[in-house]
């Protein structure tokens, strides 16, 4: 976990310094528990630390997340999906949003920030589209229902050519 935290910290521009202290404290407590040693913390201190960890979790979520959407894609588009697709993820890294499609040993990552521009009154911010109080499943459902794979240029990576044509005729009226 410590190395994952360090990797995250290197990617973030403005990290509250108290977050590093809290993570170090949690790691120390974990080490004591694993080694059967007393944790040396009161219930009140533990509660304060858990509140701070919740804040850190929300901070991390605002700066990065991965949502696997392939199961939801299969529910809506199963007959038209490329059979070799192994994973389709919405990835937020810092302030960028990507759609990543994995097919066997091949990965395509497409920048989809344009669809969620913060200053676009029509679409709204990334935070408003992927709120913390929703599950990954709910966020995946929202994404599938609202994201246009055709205008984003991602359809050749996801759908077969026959499937793309059928979807365009059936749902888009082309």
Image (cartoon, grey):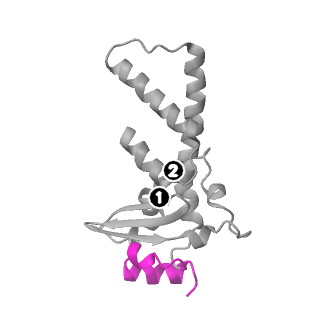
Q: Mark 2 points at which residue?
A: 137
| Span colored in magenta | 151-174
Q: Quadrant of the N terminus?
A: top left
Query: In what element is the residue under mark 1?
Result: helix
One can see residue 34 in this view: yes
Q: Please give left or right for residue 21 compared with residue 163 in the image.
A: right
Residue 48: x %, y % from top left: 60, 24
Residue nearer the viewer, 25 or 55:
25
| Real-space CA distance between mark 1 and mark 2, rounded to the nearest whole angstrom | 8 Å
Residue 151: x %, y % from top left: 55, 79
Identify the residue at image location x=47%, y=27%. 25
Residue nearer the viewer, 109 or 23:
23
Answer above or below: position of 155 versus 99: below
Answer above or below: position of 138 versus 109: above
Query: What number is the disc on residue 72?
Result: 1
Q: Please give left or right for residue 29 compared with residue 148 in the image.
A: left
Answer above or below: position of 13 versus 28: below
Query: What number is the disc on residue 144?
Result: none
Q: How crowded is mark 1: few (under 14 residues within 10 Å), some or many (20 or more)?
A: some
Pointer 1 with pointer 2, Cβ within 8 A: yes
Q: Please give left or right for residue 121 compared with residue 93 in the image.
A: right
Q: Quadrant of residue 57?
A: top right
Identify the residue at image location x=42%, y=29%. 27
Identify the residue at image location x=58%, y=64%. 145
Residue nearer the viewer, 143 or 172:
143
């Amino acid at each position: 976990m410590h190395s994952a935290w360090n990797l995250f910290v290197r990617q973030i521009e403005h990290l509250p310094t108290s977050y590093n202290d809290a993570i170090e404290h949690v790691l120390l407590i974990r080490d004591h528990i694993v080694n059967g040693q007393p944790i040396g913390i009161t219930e009140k201190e533990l509660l304060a630390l858990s509140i701070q960890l919740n804040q850190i979790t929300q901070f991390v979520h605002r700066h990065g997340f991965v949502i696997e959407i392939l199961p939801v894609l299969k529910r809506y588009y199963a007959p038209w999906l490329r059979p070799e697709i192994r994973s389709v993820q919405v990835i937020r890294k810092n302030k960028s949003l990507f759609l990543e499609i994995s097919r066997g040993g091949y990965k395509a990552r497409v920048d989809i920030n344009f669809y969620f521009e913060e200053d676009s009154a029509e679409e709204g911010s990334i935070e408003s589209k992927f709120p913390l109080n929703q599950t990954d499943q709910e966020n995946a459902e929202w994404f599938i229902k609202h994201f246009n794979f055709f205008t984003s240029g991602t359809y050749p990576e996801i759908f077969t050519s026959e499937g793309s044509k059928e979807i365009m005729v059936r749902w888009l009226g082309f």
